[in-house]
Amino acid sequence: MPRLLWVALLAAACSSSYTPRSQRRLSVVMSGGTLAAVRDGRQIDLGLFGGGLEDAVRGVPQAEEEARTFHNRMVSGFLVGMGGMVCSMVAVGAAAESDINGDDTSAELGISLGCLVAAFVGFGVMASGPPHMYDAVNIYNDAVELAPSPAPIPYAPRTPGPPGGF
């Protein structure tokens, strides 16, 4: 039971409680520990690698392209990074086995180093993705602000309550 309580607390800690009002602009929020976009009163889950962002910015080609770049860099960077880490660990294991057998380990250690470099490159590609997410959101928002509104956005300012706070 305590584990379930920790999981619930961590999920609540990785969420925002404010939902932006319905509008044409795109807002990015945290929902259940992951990023989500809010547009036209609809929440769009961006997914682990940002695949939902393209749907969120649909209708603005330049923003869609930035969203694709973001998603592609996240996926390819993760795959290359994790592949490099696994390759490096396997090569170190092979080097340990060669050492036990009394063989030369330089080839295995060289492969391990090369795989580790590939992992860092992959994670670097992944780290270069988020700026494209912000570009996609900003390009989309700029485009919808410049476009004529199909209908007035309903917004009624709050009226002040009676004096005294009631």
Image (tube, helix red, strand yellow):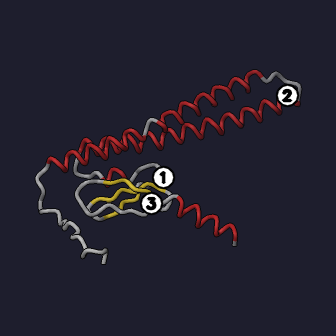
Picture disc at residue 16 = 3
Picture disc at residue 98 = none
Q: CA distance from mark 3 to mark 2?
A: 52 Å
For label 1, the crowd category at 10 Å Cα-Cα, with few meaning under 14, some 14 to 19 and many 20 or more, is: few
Q: Which residue is mark 1?
A: 48
Residue 40, horizontal then vertical, whole percent? 26, 62
Task: Tell me the mark number nearer the camera, choosing from 3 and 2.
Answer: 3
Q: Relative to the observer, which residue lies in front, 93 or 11? A: 11
Above or below, 157 against 48 in this view is below
Q: Is residue 6 toward the left or the right of residue 71 in the image? A: right
- The residue type indicated by label 2 comes to Asp
Q: Residue at x 49, y 62 (%)?
A: 32
Dot placed on the residue nearer the N-terminal end, 3 or 1: 3
Furthest residue in direction bottom, as rendered:
166
Q: Is residue 82 toward the left or the right of residue 144 in the image? A: right
Q: Marks 1 and 2: CB-CB under 8 Å?
A: no
For label 2, the crowd category at 10 Å Cα-Cα, with few meaning under 14, some 14 to 19 and many 20 or more, is: few
Q: Name the image quarter holding residue 138.
A: top left
Residue 81, horizontal then vertical, whole percent? 57, 37
For label 3, the crowd category at 10 Å Cα-Cα, with few meaning under 14, some 14 to 19 and many 20 or more, is: few
Furthest residue in direction front, as rendered:
164
Above or below, 90 against 153 in this view is above
Q: Relative to the observer, which residue lies in front, 91 or 141? A: 141
Dot placed on the residue nearer the N-terminal end, 1 or 2: 1
- The residue type indicated by label 3 comes to Ser
Q: Which residue is mark 2?
A: 99
Q: Residue at x 76, y 21 (%)?
A: 106
Residue 155, horizontal then vertical, whole percent? 19, 65
Q: Is residue 130 toward the left or the right of residue 154 in the image? A: right
Task: Tell me the mark number nearer the camera, choosing from 1 and 2.
Answer: 1
